[in-house]
Every structure is written in C-alpha cells, then in structure tokens.
Amino acid sequence: MTNSFTQASDLAFSFSGFSRLLAALLWRMGMLAIVAVLMFPELVLAQTPAVYSLYVPKTWKLGAEPLPLRIQIDAGRVTQPTVTVNWQLDDSTPQRRTLNRTDLGQPSDPDPALTELGSNLNITSTGQHTFRLWFSDEDGAVTLGDTLAVSILALEHDFERRILLEEFTGTWCGWCPSGMEVVYDLAEAYPGRIVPVLIHNRDPMAFEEGDLLTSLANLSGFPSAQIDRTTFPGIVVAPAIFRDIWAAATEAQLRAASRASLAAEVAYNDTTREITVDLSSTFLTDFTGMPRFGLHLLEDSMSFSGAGWDQANYTNTHAGSRWFGQGNPIRNFVHRHVLRAIPGGVRGISGVIPQEVEKGQTFTHRITFARPRGTRLRQLSVVAYIYNESGSNKLKEIFQTVEVPVVERTGVSRNPQATTIFEAALMPNPARHQAELHFRLQTGQAARWTLFDVQGRELRQVDLGTLPAGPHRLPLDVSELPAGLYFVALTAGTHTHIERLLVD
C-alpha cells in the first residue's frame, strides 16, 4: 500500500507540468474534470481548489469598518469531502477554516456559492499591505497549490467613497426586477453612497454607446452589474457579476479608499439646450495607468405604456418581492436611473490626465454637450467618475463617483464634496405612506424643506429652525399625495439639495 501511494505521488509530480498545460487547453471547453479522471486518475489527488473570487478591495480607507471575509471557491476543483482555507494579513498569525465540500455549491454552478470565512479584514495603518490566502490540509501543515497574494493600499481621506453600480437590464428580462430590488435595497442601506446606473439593452431605452458599454463588460447573462468596474482577486476576469454577489462586492468597495477626490459642477443653458460640466480631481497618491474622467447622463422615472416599455416580471408570484402581484409584465413600469448618454465616450475622456501622476496633482476639465431630444430636464442628472481605463479588466478601477442633478435653481450646490449638506437621501423611495429624509450637516444652519410637483409648483414647506451639525432624520407624510413623481428641496444656509421622491 505504501509503495502504491509513493508511485502515485511520483506520477502526479512528474506529470505536473504536462497537466497544467493540458488544463489550460481544456478548461474553457469544460472537459478538464472528465479528462483528468479518465486519463490520469492520480492527478485528481493533486488538483488545487481554485479561488473563484475573494471579495476584498484593492485599496482601504483608514477608519473603515472591518470587512467580513467572503469567498467563492470553484467547487469543480474540490475532490475531497473538506477543504481548508488559510489567510493572513501581512505578518499576522495565520487563520484557517475547514469547509465542507457540500457547502461550496455544485461543480456546474456558473456562479459558485458565496462562503463566509467567519473572520473580518481590518487595516489600521496607511501604506501597502499584503493579504494572503491559500489551501492546505486540515492541520495547515501541507500547502496545496499556490498562494493568492493581494496587494491593498491603505489611504486616509476625509470624504466618503461613493460606489458606481452599473446594472445591465432590459424590459424583456423577467428576472431584472429582482436585480433592481437589490439595487434599491443597497441604496437604502447605504444612503448617499450608492450611485445606480441602469443600462438598458434591446428595448426603447437602449442606444448605441450603451450597447458598446454592455459588450465591454463581458456579460454572462441578465441582470448583471459592475461594482466600480472592479474585478476581485481570483480566476474571474470580467467585472460584471450576478445579482446574488452584488451586496458582497458593494460592501467590499465601501471600505475602499479613493485614489483621487472628485468634484463636479453642472450648468444648463436653456437657450442652446447645452449642459456644461466642470470636473476637478486631486490625486491622493502616485499613480501609473490610464486615469480618465468619465460621464453618464441619466434620466429618472421614465414610464410609458405599450410594446417595449412594459417590464417582464418573473417575481410576480414571489411573496416579499417589491413587485409581487403587480403582473407579468408590469404595465406603466417606472424605470429609474436610466442611462441616456455617455458624454466623452465609453472609454472616458482622454488627453486630460497623463499616465504618470504624482500625489497632490490636480486636474480640471470642462465638457459641454447637447441635451438629448426627448429627455425631461428635471429628471436629468450627471454622474461623473474618475477611473483607470486599462486594457486589462483586472486593472480597471473607479476611484470616485459623484451625481449632480441638471436643475437650474438659485442656491443649488453643484459640488457634492464642498456643500453644507452631505449624504442626503429619501427612504424608502418609492414611498407609499411615509418617507424619511436622511441628511448630514457640516455646520449648524437654519434649514427648511420644500415639496414640489413635477411642474415645479410648491405643495408644502416646513421651517426646521436652526439644526446642529451632524446627522438628521425628518419624517415626511406622503399618504395624501397622489401617486407620481415629486421633488424635495432641502435648504441649509445658502445651499439647497434636491431629492426625487416617487410616491406609489
């Protein structure tokens, strides 16, 4: 028995180079497991579990909350009843957890099950850090395969990171309402920090540049989403992921530091129908790559009836869904955060920021573009972002995102990072009986809020007196309002922030 085991081990070792080449050639054809079993049964013992995705960010904002460690393991590479995962931050004491093979999902799953490791990642000092993850026997004595090493840059800054969530959807897609539900849940859980963009395909809201953005995302199906266009460490090379992973990816990115700040000011010329955006960014660290400004123009709350507009809804019979019992399809569905144009192009605005950037450098840019025909001014907003436009998906990364409404109002602050009012959001939204206005004031200010309808008529105004600096929550009774779109303007001092409110 001992001799047989030794011979098997020697055979596995001698064939290791050939097996890797064979794996590379056959993996994409879905034949690796079959060939390994039929031709080289000894090699199955030598297979290494593969990390499908490890949900940790590429940067870390000092002071961020500890991040629960989550991982996807390719179940098709696990041949034993258990697999032991080890991890370590820098030179700290390694930790490990043994997982049951049955908890990892089926080998045929296109998106492996998300597994909690039962530990948190927390970085408490600035600079470069290394997080390592590897597989071993249960005692940790024998390492199986290579170690996945992740470099994480920890930075310190005093502004909030905002996450760009680009969802790929379509009115024909019956599961897309469940994707929208994930987006709304995340926006409510992290008010003011999630910037949703819905990119429609093969329906009346689709357009050529949106289709190109979809093709660059390497989708495996609908609905899919890009979270800050970031790929996470592992074997996955496409930034687009399925909806059951959006929350884990978003929570990781919420801990990420911004490599650069971003401010955007928006002005609209009613005579020429042109929108002008002034962008400014200061880098917080040296950077080498293809840093660029990017822009999206969104239109909110689009609702029409007829062919192509009604939303297919497979959640119609799913109790607990936001769209339970609303029909399949849903007539007069309200489509939110709809991408309508990509000013500056799908690959961003080139020629503004050089490939080599030093810490502290500031870059500015002004872009003017025509407001698309058929869009409604009060429902338009500009989403600006600064990112690395790399030829490799693994190097793409959005550094910071801001959203600014395209609305001409005296006193409206156009710079979300220089305003008195921070992190403003209405929840829930849509609302049926009551909503809450959440916001934070940088300094104590006299404040009031005003409710407008879509024609700009003032319906209600409440004087709040002088509010102290810090977070606030204000109840808004909407029970007597007819269903439709409204605007809530919060004014503090000389600054006004406008939120859209949809009443069911």
Image: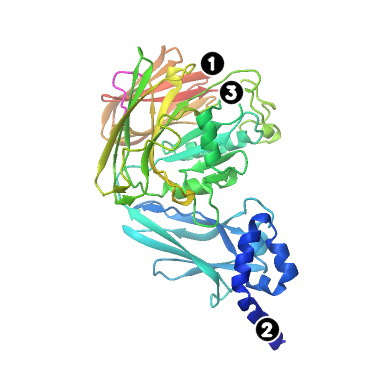
Using the rendered view, name the quadrant where residue 77 is placed: bottom right
Above or below 337: residue 112: below
Colour mapping used in the image: rainbow
Main SS, magenta region, reads loop
Q: Secondary structure at mark 1?
A: loop
* Picture quadrant where residue 333 is located: top right
Q: Position of residue 430 (x, y in %)?
A: 52, 27
Q: Badge 2: how crowded within 10 Å, few (<14), some, or many (20+)?
A: few
Q: CA distance from mark 2 to mark 1?
A: 79 Å
Kind of residue at badge 2: Gln
Of marks 1 and 3, which one's residue comes earlier in the chain?
Answer: 3
Q: Residue 465: x percent and y percent?
A: 29, 24
Identify the mark at residue 7; answer none if there is no mark: 2
In the rendered structure, the answer to whether residue 171 lies left or right of residue 473 reads right
Q: Secondary structure at mark 3?
A: loop
What residue sits right under mark 3 in the picture? 204
Q: Are there few (<14), some (14-19), or many (20+) residues within 10 Å of tag 1?
A: few
Q: What SS does tag 2 mark?
A: helix
Q: Magenta stretch: residue 409 in it?
A: yes
